[in-house]
Image (spheres, rainbow, N blue to C red):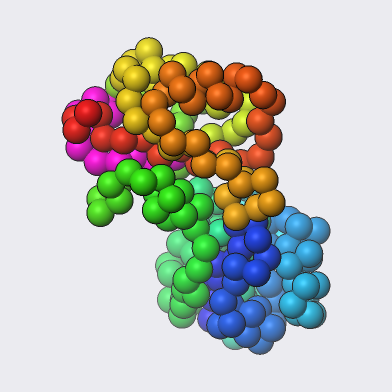
């Protein structure tokens, strides 16, 4: 069986009892970065051996994991943070496991997307998740398409692109409502709520680090 296990996005206490049990009972923990995941496993005294699987893993590694599942091994898939398969390579293992009739179970838990949307204060009964915006081709076209979108939008952004992204959104969509979430659940968690011009002034005034999740208010409702 392949267990898709959600793990903390920052605070290591944000893990379920079921997740801990599944990680302990698995034959192997499949992780993006075994050094990073090792911190979590050590905290909860989980001694299950790890196997790596990340975006640069060769096809042979994927097939090795599928073969282990076919042989009856139980694998617990985790990402560096949050729920596997959401903007991470775990999706490929899940897809291949399904194609090979492997039993899959998902253990729910932390998600930066849900955490940011709920904390933003923007309408969250319906929202559109975009993952990471395209780096070049199609980027401005995608942003422009949000003019006709009636829902709250959420996406991830890297710290070195946060100013550029806010400037592009301002130029294309105008000074709309936004919540910029940084380092969610960690010691230096920050959630900035306001207009894009205000967010730009705030983040230009300091050097911001960490992971960003941006929540954009529906343009049609502003």
Where residue 77 appears, as percent x and y from the top left, is: 60, 68
183 relative to 99, above or below: above
Residue 78 point in image, percent of width and height: 61, 65
Of 18 and 50, nearer the camera is 18
Residue 66 or 16: which is nearer the viewer? 16
Q: Residue, x 24% and y 41% (percent of image)?
A: 151
Query: Image quarter for residue 74?
Result: bottom right
- Whether 46 is among the magenta residues is no
Residue 217 in view of the camera: yes
Q: Is residue 105 left or right of residue 35?
A: left
Q: Residue at x 80, y 72 (%)?
A: 42
- Residues shaded magenta: 145-155
Residue found 43% across the figure and 50% down from its top = 119
Residue 86 in the image, given as x and y percentages of width and height: 48, 53
Please check the rendered image and state whether residue 150 is part of the magenta-colored stretch, yes or no: yes
Residue 156 seen in the current view: no
Q: Is residue 58 above or below residue 41?
A: above
Q: Position of residue 197 (x, y in %)?
A: 43, 19
Count up the numbered dots. Answer: 0
Q: Pick the residue in front: 219 or 2.
A: 219
Question: Quadrant location of residue 98?
Answer: bottom left
Residue under the image location 65 percent in, 69 percent down? 13
Q: Nearer the viewer, residue 66 or 22?
A: 22
In the image, farthest residue toward the top: 171
Quadrant containing the C terminus is top left
Horizontal side, residue 136 vs residue 117: left or right: right
């Amino acid at each position: 069986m392949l267990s898709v296990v959600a793990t903390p996005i920052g605070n290591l206490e944000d893990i379920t009892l079921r997740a801990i049990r599944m990680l302990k009972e698995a034959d192997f923990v499949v992780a993006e970065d075994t050094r990073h995941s090792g911190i979590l496993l050590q905290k909860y005294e989980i001694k299950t051996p790890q196997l790596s699987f990340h975006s640069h893993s060769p096809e042979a590694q994927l097939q090795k994991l599928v073969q282990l599942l076919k042989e009856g091994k139980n694998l617990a898939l985790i990402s560096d943070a949050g729920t596997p398969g959401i903007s991470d390579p775990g999706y490929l293992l899940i897809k291949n496991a399904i194609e090979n009739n492997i039993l899959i179970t998902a253990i729910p838990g932390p998600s930066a997307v849900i955490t940011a949307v709920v904390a933003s204060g923007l309408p969250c009964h319906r929202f559109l998740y975009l993952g990471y915006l395209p780096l070049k081709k199609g980027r401005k076209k995608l942003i422009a398409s949000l003019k006709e979108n009636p829902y709250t939008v959420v996406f991830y952004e890297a710290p070195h692109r946060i100013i550029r992204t806010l400037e592009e959104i301002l130029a294309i969509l105008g000074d709309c409502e936004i919540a910029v979430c940084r380092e969610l659940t960690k010691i230096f968690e920050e959630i900035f709520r306001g207009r894009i011009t205000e967010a730009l002034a705030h983040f230009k005034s300091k050097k911001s680090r960490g992971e960003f999740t941006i929540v954009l208010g529906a343009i049609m409702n502003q």
